[in-house]
Amino acid sequence: MTNPAERPPLYRSGDRVIAGVCSGLAHHLGWPVKNVRLAMVVAAFAGGAGLAFYAWLWVLVPTADEGARRAARRPVSPIAPAVNGESGPRPAPWFTGSGVNGRFRYGKELLLGAGLLSVAGILIAKQFGADVPLGTLIPAAAILGGAAIAWMQLDENRRAGLVDKTKADQAGGWVRLAAGLALVVAGVLVMVSGSGSWEQTWLALLASVAVLGGVALVLLPWGLKFWKDLEAERAGRVRETERAEIAAHLHDSVLQTLALIQRRAGSEQDVVRLARAQERELRGWLYRDQAADAGHLAERIKSAAAEVEDAHGHVVDVVSVGDAVTTERHEALVQAAREAMLNAARHGGGPVSVYLESSDKGSEVFVKDRGPGFDPEAVSPDRLGVRESIIGRMKRHGGTAVITSGPDGTEVRLKLPAAAPEERNGEGRS
Amino acid sequence: MNDAEGARSVRVVVVDDHAIFRSGLKADLDARIDVVGEAGSVEDAIRVIAEQRPEVVLLDVHLPGGLGGGGREVINKSAQLLGSTSFLALSVSDAAEDVVAVIRAGARGYVTKTISGAEISDAVIRVADGDAVFSPRLAGFVLDAFGTSPAEIADDELDRLSARELEVMRLIARGYSYKEVAKELFISIKTVETHVSAVLRKLQLSSRHELTKWAAERRLL
């Protein structure tokens, strides 16, 4: 797979004739500005399509400044550069229409049921000769219904806002708002005019809709701007919180370590150890895998390596492939690996490489150093380190340990098959 | 590594946004390396590389400027030079997506910033010779992505590692140098390099389902 062509994000440009839409678009598409402008003008004569498109972009596309602020607001992520390049500008939020969420299904049915029941009640009452003022009831019901629809949408929006801030069902919301508004207006008109004359009501309705439309047209830009400001402020607050959290972490860890390093500048050993420990801690914080469980094998091996590193000031690099849930037998593997790392840090030279591979067949750990090496056969029987803690421990848990040593260094290979014979399991607790 | 190469000097451009790191690296690199240019941002890097046409670019994964694509963007924008210029990624990042992204963009290898000057020099020479450089961690990522069971059928050649390639990757992940790998498997260093280059090619070209899934889980593609 090759990387898709990277495009500059779509922003309104500062180099502008009207609102910088054309030059921004040209920059985004990599076309000459003149062509884009010409195309826009031609399109404007095609039934005003160009004008509509221009206006639409004007409203929705941020200026370069706004864009930069927005980009800075993106959640801080250690891997952001790898991800951001490809994602580019986000599409306008209300494009991504989504289905109506099912939360209000019951509410709707209840409302409908209640409405039908009351209609039925009114009809029955009429049958029995009761004088029902239909002329008042119907508009009142229309007003109530319209208000209910409009308010329901507000409530749902707020809830959706908590769950998902993209406002994906904005389109549905507008339709609902309009429907509610129409119902309420119609109801009010019928009630106020009181005449019940259909023609008169119809005219009044048209007039009021026209007035409302005009007001909306005037207020829309203001409303949009207000909404955008609100969004910007909310995002700003989120960023502020994130920043505070990061600052707190850096203060607790990195700044403390830097202060310590300055005070111990004389001792190279201490400085290296501090720097390394801090590096490990910061890495753990930045690249921590949310899914990684502290109880898993890879995590255990890594923490064992960290202990050895702290104790001996010796770099221990851990590479792991696959992972497994630790059992008692894995615990033995971790302990044996730890012992091997300790030996490597104590006697070996250069960095210690640890490689862990887990699959459903079993787990293997390799610990390699670049020390002068030793003869495993010549290790005196009283040295418990290798014989007991590594080889013996692995054997008791149904695994194997092989130590190879040469002038290039020593490697300890620990292997633990997935399933051990039962009787050995019991023996291991001695 | 190889004494015959001692006379040769490789033209290198160092791209890193920290001036301190650049000067430290220049001091660390040995006599076989001739640093002909430096850059600290995506735009500078693209310009300097186009001007100098170095054999090798030591490229930091995270760089300011450009469209925010960092090292990957530099490689993409210098794509027409890929035939004559090789990129060696250099990073403090442990994140799989950072590393694999630059490799898939066309880098010939990846080393961490903590390795010694002699090791970086060796890696530069190796990349200049057209070979690939794998750190233990990159080998670990490859094994993680491709799985640890060998390919049996020939037709998914791009999507799996052969038994031999797996062995080589495992040994590199265990911290073996190419020389040690060759000794361990009773093959020549040249053969090891061939295997590693083949793995690099697979990593760059494979559209394997699992690799995509693996990368997607790490928000890469």
Image (cartoon, coloured by chain):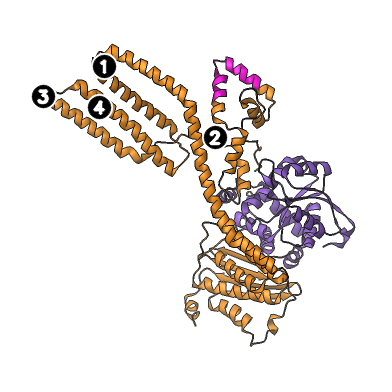
Chain colours: A orange, B purple
In-image side of B212 versus A315 (left or right): left
Which residue occupies 62% across, 22% down?
A: A18
Residue A402: give x, y in percent of width and height: 64, 75
Q: Which mark is residue B96?
A: none
Residue B92 part of the magenta-drawn span: no
Categorize mark 1 by other alpha carbons within 10 Å: few (<14), some (14-19), many (20+): few
Q: Which mark is residue A193?
A: 1
**Same chain for marks 4 and 2?**
yes
Residue at image mark 2: A91
Which residue occupies 12% across, 22% down?
A: A131
Secondary structure under tag 2 reads loop
Residue at image mark 4: A141
Say which chain tag 1 marks. Answer: A
In-image side of A246 versus A351 (left or right): left
Q: Is residue A185 above or below residue A318?
A: above
Q: Are marks 1 and 2 in contact (CB under 8 Å)?
A: no
Bounds of the magenta segment: A37-55
Extreme left residue here? A128
Residue A42 part of the magenta-drawn span: yes
Q: Quadrant of the N terminus of chain A?
A: top right
Dot 4 or dot 3: first in sequence order is 3
**Alpha carbon distance from label 4 to label 3:** 19 Å
Residue at image mark 3: A130
Residue A393 or A385: which is nearer the viewer? A385
Residue A3: give x, y in percent of width and height: 65, 41
The three-letter amino acid code for the residue at tag 4 is Ala
